[in-house]
Image (spheres, grey):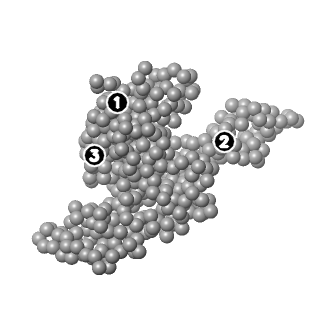
Amino acid sequence: MSGSLIAGLDIGTSKVCCATAEMDENGNASITGAGQASVEGCLREGVLLDVAGVAAAIEKAVSDAELLCSATIQSVFAGVSGAHVRGFSGTGTVSVGRQDESETREITLDDVRRAEEAARAVGLPPGCRVLETIRRDYSVDGFDRLRKPPVGLRAEQLTASIYTVIADRTAVHNLEAAIDAAGLETAGVFPSAMASGASVLTRDEMEMGVAIADIGAGTTDVAVYRNGFPAHAGVVPLGGDNITHDLQALRIPLEQAESIKTGWAVASAGMVDPNLSRKVPMLGNRSVFTVSHSVVSQVVGQRVEEIFEGVLAELLKAGVELVDLPAGLVITGGSSRLQGLADVAGRVTGLAVQHGVPSGLETSTGMVLTPEFATCIGLIQLARETVEEARNRRGKGLSGLFRRLTGAAGKLR
């Protein structure tokens, strides 16, 4: 029997990326296709403003991915970002057995469910939608960090710890409306920050303690992992577009400002060449003027500092100290390519900084092994876990739910 298709869709401020993977019955997945399309002025800080414009970009990106994988994409797993995406921890403690019993009892699945329900019983803000609920660990009579449900152990009390990520319900509905307008179904929605972490980070890094910053055009998604599980997810409402706009304030046209940002300016003062300059058109293209490497790099560096001050604020909001993150900070996303950005990130946050690209899946196209596809590939990896959980609950056969989740591919040839 042929495998089933999983598609990840990352709708960003400047571009839409789509990637596909074939998944076999053993849970193995390999990337088979990828596509991307520009989208301008349709999103602001991760919030969708133009359904028709985004739908057109989705159709283009999906069409390009279909050409590579020779399959029809019917449904997608999408990522959601924006300042409205946030997460919080919850714990729930229950007694095992009756309090009047003289002996401890064995923990049952019902006890585990009760503890998890108690952990979820926190007040959610109105108008929100739960994106992800992660079972982190359990503790039994004060003995903590048990990874699996401690069914069968004898105890008096059981505590479950979970992490819940929520988003604005209307923002998610608009995202789904654009996907529907493109002729696709939404199989699932995940936080973009956690998707990026799934594709870029290693298990060892997550165990030791690590942060990831996915720097896109409009937002920077931040996630923290400790003891193998997400400890925080947040968004900094700044990205590469802010750097471009700062350069435009020097009266540089948009196209030239983008070119200077990506190919000439540097974020780190130590990389500036004080003797370097270039001529650029003035806004309106009626004349040219000379800009120095020092000036444009100072503008870029100041905004990059602000971005990582926001990242540091997210870490502090999560109660994270530098000693909690021995694996440091991993940066990814399209805007992470900026020269000298890692140096500034390390200086502002005080963490060891590394660049990250997607890994962990076989691929037939090198397009996806870039920072721009970190979220997209992570969506496929999170979707694969979702599919595997569904299969485990229903046996090894392909259930109707499994086929719906994977958007079972219809081969073109």
Residue located beneath label 3 in the image: 37
Q: For the residues marked 1 and 2, what is the alpha-carbon distance in whole angstroms?
A: 36 Å
Q: List x then y, in percent, for residue 257.
A: 25, 65
Check the picture and name the quadrant holding the N terminus: top left
Residue at x 54% of width, y 64% of height: 351
Instruction: Say if mark 2 contacts mark 3, CB within 8 Å.
Output: no
What label sits on residue 74 in the rendered view? Answer: 1
**Which of the 4 image quarters holds residue 95?**
top right
Return the disc, 1 or 3, that comes first in the chain's sequence.
Answer: 3
Q: Classify residue 359 as left or right of residue 411.
A: right
Residue at x 46% of width, y 22% of height: 400
Q: For the residues marked 2 and 3, what is the alpha-carbon distance in whole angstroms?
A: 41 Å
The answer, for residue 56, to whether it is visible in the render is yes
Residue at x 59% of width, y 64% of height: 322
- Front residue of 46/380: it is 380
- Reply above or below: 154 against 399: below
Q: How many discs appear?
A: 3
Q: Residue furthest right?
A: 102
- Three-letter residue code for mark 3: Ala
What label sits on residue 242 in the rendered view? Answer: none
Residue located beneath label 2 in the image: 147
- Reply above or below: 322 against 361: below
Q: For the residues marked 1 and 3, what is the alpha-carbon distance in whole angstroms?
A: 18 Å
Check the picture and name the quadrant holding the C terminus: top left
Q: Residue furthest left?
A: 286
Q: Classify residue 64 as left or right of residue 3.
A: left
Q: Secondary structure at mark 2?
A: loop
Return the disc, 1 or 2, that comes first in the chain's sequence.
Answer: 1
- Front residue of 191/226: it is 226
